[in-house]
Amino acid sequence: MSDGERSRGHRARWIALGVAALALSIWVLGFATRGLLSGDSGVKLAQAHALWDSRFESRALPYDRTLDPAQRFVPYGEFIRKVHGERQGIYPVTFAAASAPLIGVLGLAGMMILPLGGALLIMLGVDRLLGRMGASPPARAAAAIVSVCATPLLLYTAQYAEHTLGVGLTIMALAMVVPRDDRRVRPLLAGALAALAATVRPECYLTVATVGLALSARPGAWDRAGLRARAIEAAWYLGGALTVLGAYWGLNLWLSGTWDPLVSFQKKAPDRWANVRRMMIGDVKRDPGPWLLLPCLAAAAGLALPPRWGRGWPGVIVRVVAGVALVWLAWRIRQVATGRTLMGMFSLTPLALYGLVACAWAPRWRQTWLFAVLTTVAIIGLNKSNDAGGLQLGARLVFPALPALIALAVAAVDDDVRAARPAPLRALPMFAPAALLMASVLML
């Protein structure tokens, strides 16, 4: 590709991203409903109002003691805790404090600014990540747009919730530990961004670890010559993360008497297997246990396939077979879903399934693959919720892994398109992710 063609490709990419960002902003700020999906968001909104109304002097939630001086009928339910005689919400003070001025000045429209900003950050992070993975400009733009506009993250872009912000910070951190061709990474800033995500979403404590593991797993990380450099990078990463987390924990101890009110509120999950089923598939008419093995086998194939196979016709055959199997799995999931299932990462976003096998033919993507798989397993396995996240669209607790899986799937299609120029039959595997993308859009 000539320099002129490359320049035109990047210009078209920025135009596509700009148009998508503008359309998303117009929809969120001009047309999206200003309602709240759940009571959680109502408590977060009350926290923001409490900070703004008190000029950031108190976190105490407003309550009319004239009607109930004994405080026997306090609203907000179990999502509050009593600290120094005042009732505080359990949700992160960082998100409430950042959004309080926006809500105080702009009213209900101010609720949408941070979620919208988080969605735009996801698009920027996915674009940057795909660039570091060697994808073409069209693939970078497509993955960035699909990650927000063809997944359940679209709903949370127009909700007063911190999901998009946490995911956006996480994917930006991941993009900074995946090296370009010159092997440069930015571990200090990556650690700070990953930790900042944890201050707004508790599941992102786990992504601080998985981004760090992705940093350690980059090509050449453990050869003798690079071991010292990797240790220095890990130290910088930990330094950035612990600086942010230390400040956040100290603030929480001072304001609320605990290092993290939301994490300390969580209780042991009564049925972890039910949570696994709900997060991966959703509520179903019968136990889909054996089917859950298919994503696991897909992930295993992605890890185990020898690189020399992945680059040749054996890799094409494996990808065609895996793609057909995943399309069948997505169809079966839809058949057994209880009505229109509201949760389940792979039922609502079948395209994410294809990301599990992506690194089977591109070892250079294994950092992103490792992050996506470990994040999914860690969040699902360690989740302590008794209802897998409650009322939601998509497995909202597993959102940090979703853009990485989309990026892997699109990068795989991009490679197949390039390979198809001299050998058209090499494009056969791309029809499976195309079908999965269509299913992802139709499920929303």
Image (cartoon, rainbow, N blue to C red):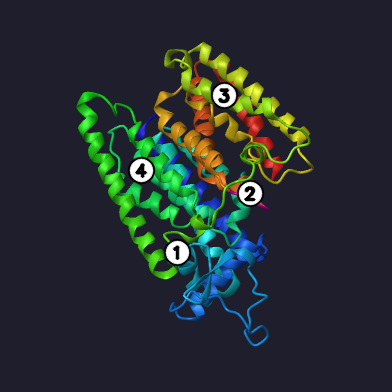
Q: Nearer the viewer, residue 13 or 408?
A: 408
**Mark nearer the N terminus (2 vs 3):** 3
Residue type at the position of mark 3: Ala
> Residue 167: where, in percent of width, then height?
49, 49
185 shown above or below 321: below
Q: For mark 2, what is the residue?
A: 386
- How far apart are the alpha carbons under marks 4 and 1? 23 Å
Upstream in sequence: badge 4 or badge 3: 4
Numbered range of the magenta stretch: 385-391
- Dot 2 or dot 1, earlier in sequence: 1
Tell me whether the residue at label 2 lies in contact with that at label 1, contact meaning CB atoms closer than 8 angstroms: no
Q: Which residue is mark 4?
A: 176
Q: Position of residue 427 (x, y in %)?
A: 57, 21
Marks 4 and 2: CB-CB under 8 Å? no
Q: Quadrant of the C terminus?
A: top right
- The residue located at (38%, 36%) in the rendering is 213
Q: Quadrant of the N terminus?
A: top left
Closer to the eye: label 4 or 2:
2
Q: Nearer the viewer, mark 4 or mark 1?
A: 1
Which numbered mark, 2 or 3, is in the foreground of this view?
2
> Mark 4: which amino acid?
Met
Q: Note whether residue 3 is visible.
A: yes
Can I make out residue 4 in this image?
Answer: no
Q: How many marks?
A: 4
Residue located beneath label 1 in the image: 94
Q: Secondary structure at mark 4?
A: helix
Between residue 128 and residue 11, name the one nearer to us. Answer: 128
